[in-house]
Structure formats: structure tokens, C-alpha cells
Amino acid sequence: MREPEGQTSSHLESTAAQVGTPLVRYGLNSEGTLDAKTSADEGDGPVAVLVCHGMGQQVRYETISSVAHAIRKQAGMLSGAANIKAVGVRLSYENGSFLARAELDWTDSADKKHSVHVYEAYWAPLTQGQVSYWDTIVFLLSAGWNGLKWSKFLRWSEFKRWMFDGRKTMKIGPATKAGILAVLAFLGVQVAIIAYVLATLGGQYKAVLAENIPTIGDPGFLHGCLRLLTPFFPGIVRIIHAPLFVVDWWKASALLVLWFALIAEALFVRSFLIEYVGDVAAYISPYKDSKFDEIRTKIQNVGLSVGKTIYNFGSSPAVPHYPKIVVVGHSLGSVLAYDTLNALINLDNVSAAGGRRNVMQRTRALVTFGSPLDKTAFIFRMQARNDQSWIREQLAASVQPLIVSYPLYRPVNFDWINIWSKADVISGELNYYDDGSHPVNAWPCVQNMIDPDARRPFCAHLQYWNNPLLREQLYRLVTT
């Protein structure tokens, strides 16, 4: 087999016991994760990356490919293409389902060998067809109303949140209320456009049904078919019969173009609301009692299942397969990544001594980008109003150890990196996951980083994947 340019596969030596090919292998997840002579205490062995994809339909393995490509590209830039080995993949069967990973190997400029295994928590199919257009509208209106109640117009305001063994005061910016009103106004316009388009199309359809359907073979069959379509093309009669380029012709042409533009815009917005905002509604709504609670639980179980395999929960031997792990989440996937890491820490906390896997000691970082986590902490949640509510808030914090204790769950080996852009309306700084006792963006607080290359409105949310900042941070975290 001819190797890809600048790559070799000598690191993937076949043995009689190995199943598959040099670059596509099958077997237990534990195979190849630690050499038999390597001690986990020495910090050697491959690094694992668990990535959670964002909202909207995703292709299976696309997120693995994106993360692997980012790390590999940065390694090639720093070490040279000749030192980057061919990408291997392994398919295993874990916790009742097939689990795939990409395997990266390279040697850096200091002649140090590196190995990274990339996994994904793939949950996209769980929300397909489960959220209606009106579900998303109700969700957005409810979230907007909740945000308006707690913010002030062009003035700083605040709300309190239970974190780090106490009630912490969180600041709400003076532009928050104006921003929410602008979003609600835009939503109202879009709902009106969609309603108008659907009502008009319905009327046009009724007008077509009222016409006599032409008979095949009738001399006027073609003319009759064109007459049936006329209601769907407002102004078409004037365009056909009026002299070219006179005032009436231009008006009729403009009306027709505007109509089809409205249809295209309505279809796009409606599809976006169902496909993308619908995922958010399905996952975030269950912070209150919601019909989507079962979907959210299934999504969380996907993340937890992959995480348990990576951290070696319920497996033997007790020696961890991966001494260092990085958890990554984009967009809504950052909320799942946050929930998954918290769940794994809790699993560690409640396990017997022999079943613990030292989750925080082995977790190198949580990387979030394009993340709405601050919005979920403020807009999409219930705010405590009395002492009874604070008991609930304290219980809710207990399942989020990342906001329970800095010494225990933000150890010296752990970084929380958040990459965001001002051009990305979904993302933002994460300020509601620290108690303000430390300098902003300094460890152990969330380290917020603006991506200077994600600056195209509406596109910025996806631009992170191909920009240098994400590549550099991922490479740094898996190699240091």
C-alpha cells in the first residue's frame, strides 16, 4: 500500500494476534493504550481526547476527524511532515455499542514521541424529528421572558447563584436587556413572515383546487396547466401581458421576486429553528420539568458511556489506560462536555476505593468553544427566590463539582479554556462559573480567549474549527 505523502505506518506493526490492517484495527479499547512496561504514575502513554459535537445534524465521525486534523496540522507545522505518521483507526465494542477512535502518532522537534487517541460522543440522531417548530418558539419566548425579568435596561443588574459553598453574586451587563429585546423582536418578525407565507401558500393552494383540472389530450391541456400554476406566481399575468420594462412590468417583477425571497427566507429560518434551536430546546429545557427530559437523559448517557470507557470505569485492571485526558465541546456540545465531565467526577466520588479512577488528576483540560454555557446559567434556568429555592440550588450545584471546590475539582494540572468571538451570537465569555475571588481569566478561573480569526457574522460559530487558536490550544494541552 502506498503511504500518504510524508507519512509512514511503521508504528502500526502487524502481529499474528492483530485483527485488521496496519491502519484499520479492531479489538479492545485497552489494546495499545499503555505499554505493558509503562507505569501510569510515570505519566507516559497516549493522551485521550473526548469531543462532543454541537447543535444541528452532524455526520458520524466528522467531529473526530476535525479534532484529529487540527492536532495533526499543528504537529506538522511544528515538527515537519516527515515526522507525522499515518492516522490509524480502531473499532471496539464497549458498553453495548461500537466505539471508534482515531490514533495520531508523531515525533516532535525535540525527538519526543507523542500519541493521541480521539473519541467522540455522537448524539445527533437522538433529537431528529423530536422537536417541532412551535416547541422552539415556546422555548425561545420562555427563555427571553426569563432573561428580561432579571436584567435592567442599559443598567448593570445581578442575580445570585450557588457556587463554591455559598451564594455568589453574578453581574448582568447593561446591554443584556436590549440584546434580548432585539432578539425577541427579530423572532417576532420571523414568526410573522413564516405565518404570512404559510397562510398565503394555503390560500393559493385552495385557489388551485377550485380550478378545473385539464384533461390529458385536450388541445388546451398545456394552457390549462399553466393556468393552474398562476396563483403560485403573483403578478405573472401582468409580466406576460404588459410591455417589457414599463412601470407595471417592473412592479409585477419586483412583487414576484419579493414573494419567492420571502418563501426562501421563511423556509430557511423555520428549518434553522427546528434543526439547530430545536437541539438546544431538547437539551436545555429539562432544567425545568419538560417533555424532553428523556431525550436529554439519553444524550447525557451517550457522553457518559464514552467517558466511562476512556476513564476505564467498570473495567480491569485498575491501572488507568490514559494518564492524561482532554474533554472538548463545541457549541451545545460544550454543555454536554461540561455535564459529562461533572458526571464522571461524581461517579469517581461515589465509587468504592477500588473503583475510583482519579478523574480530576487525569483530566488535563476542558476546552469549550462557541459555548452558550453562560446563557444556560442565566437565561435558561430557574432563579432562586427564597430559602427553599436555595436548598434546590445547593442540590443542583452538588452535581456540578466544577463549581463546588477549586482545590478539589480545579487542580493545578487542570485548565478550562473557553474560546469565543464577538461575532458569534451563540458564544460568549464564561463568567458564571467562577466566584470572582481570582483575577479574571487567570487560573483556576475559566481562561476566556477571543479568537481573532472568527469574525464573520453568522459564520463565526463554525470558523473556530479551522482557525489557529483552537489548533494551538489543543496541541499544547495534549503535549504538555
Image (cartoon, rainbow, N blue to C red):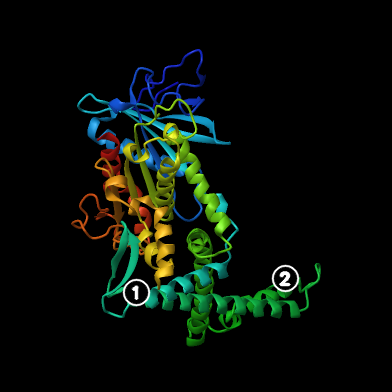
Is any part of residue 124 visible from this angle? Answer: no
**Which quadrant is home to the C terminus?**
top left
Earlier residue among tags 2 and 1: 1
Q: Secondary structure at mark 2?
A: helix
Residue kind at label 1, given as amino acid type: Gly
The image's mark for residue 375 is: none
Q: Give the quarter of the figure containing the N terminus.
A: top left
Q: Residue furthest bottom?
A: 247
Query: Residue most toward the top?
Result: 16
Residue 390 location in percent, x, y? 40, 66
Q: Which residue is under mark 2?
A: 222
**Residue 66 image point, x, y percent:** 39, 43
Label 1 residue SS: helix
- Mark number, residue 179: 1
In the rendered image, is residue 274 in sight? yes
Percent of width and height locating residue 51: 41, 44
Amino acid type at circle 2 is: Leu
